[in-house]
Amino acid sequence: TVAGAAALLYQAYRETHGGVDAPSSLIKALLLNTADDLGRVGPDFEYGWGRPHLGRALRSLQEDPILAGAVEHEERSTFSVEVPSGVQRMRVMLYWNDPAGLPMNPQALVNDLDLTVQDSEENIHLPWVLSSYPHLDSLRAPARPGRDRLNNMEQVEWLQPAPGTYTIQVEGFRIPEGPQTFFLTVLFDKGE
């Protein structure tokens, strides 16, 4: 099912981009950012990011902001997006194809990027983070906003965002192999 959904997204991208294939990282970001959340709010260890929602992913590909960039170590890229009125839920997903790690590294993630979103009232929103402490209670705990040091995908989400200009910032926290390219997908879900 997921492979079929990805194939349809590739086809839709080709039709609007002169036959050029979409980068795989963009397709994955769209599928993750538009999924139906299952289980606890946000990502979890039982359902991951949820169940793919092809209709929402296709609409997001065609209508919502898609941003791309690259950062070096301790460098920042900043983007502004206009949030329209009537949005019931907003999600911002950062995704990057991380370089392959070495087998003996204590951590699989090589390049670590950080995502923050500042809303129209200048509040800072951080991405979902799961506890990775190896105990059942910890692994079942709900995701909370914070800094993710383990994954190459980060998502900020909130309900009923106020209309206005939002600032998205991607920072190269640790980039030993750079520059690191990335994609940002923004979902304006109006509940339709």
Image (cartoon, grey):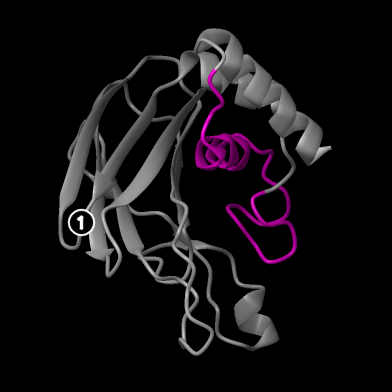
Task: Left or right? Give the position of 60 relative to 72.
Answer: right
Asked whether 143 or 116 is in front, the reply is: 116
Residue 75 placement: quadrant: bottom left
The residue lying at 72 percent from left, 37 percent from top is 52
The residue lying at 23 percent from left, 50 percent from top is 71
Q: Is residue 23 above or below residue 94?
A: above
The residue lying at 32 percent from left, 58 percent from top is 113
Asked whether 85 or 77 is in front, the reply is: 77
**What element does badge 1 sit on?**
loop
Task: Left or right? Give the position of 179 relative to 137.
Answer: left
Q: Is residue 149 above or below residue 184?
A: below
The residue lying at 41 percent from left, 66 percent from top is 148
Amino acid of disc 1: Glu
Q: Is residue 101 above or below residue 163?
A: below
Residue 66 in percent (x, y) is at 41, 27
Magenta-drawn stretch, dominant element (helix, strand or loop): loop
Give the residue furthest to the front: 19
Inspect this view and state whether residue 53 appears. Answer: no
**Residue highlighted by disc 1:** 72
> Which quadrant, please, contains the C terminus?
top right
Residue 43 in percent (x, y) is at 60, 56
Asked whether 32 or 160 is in front, the reply is: 32
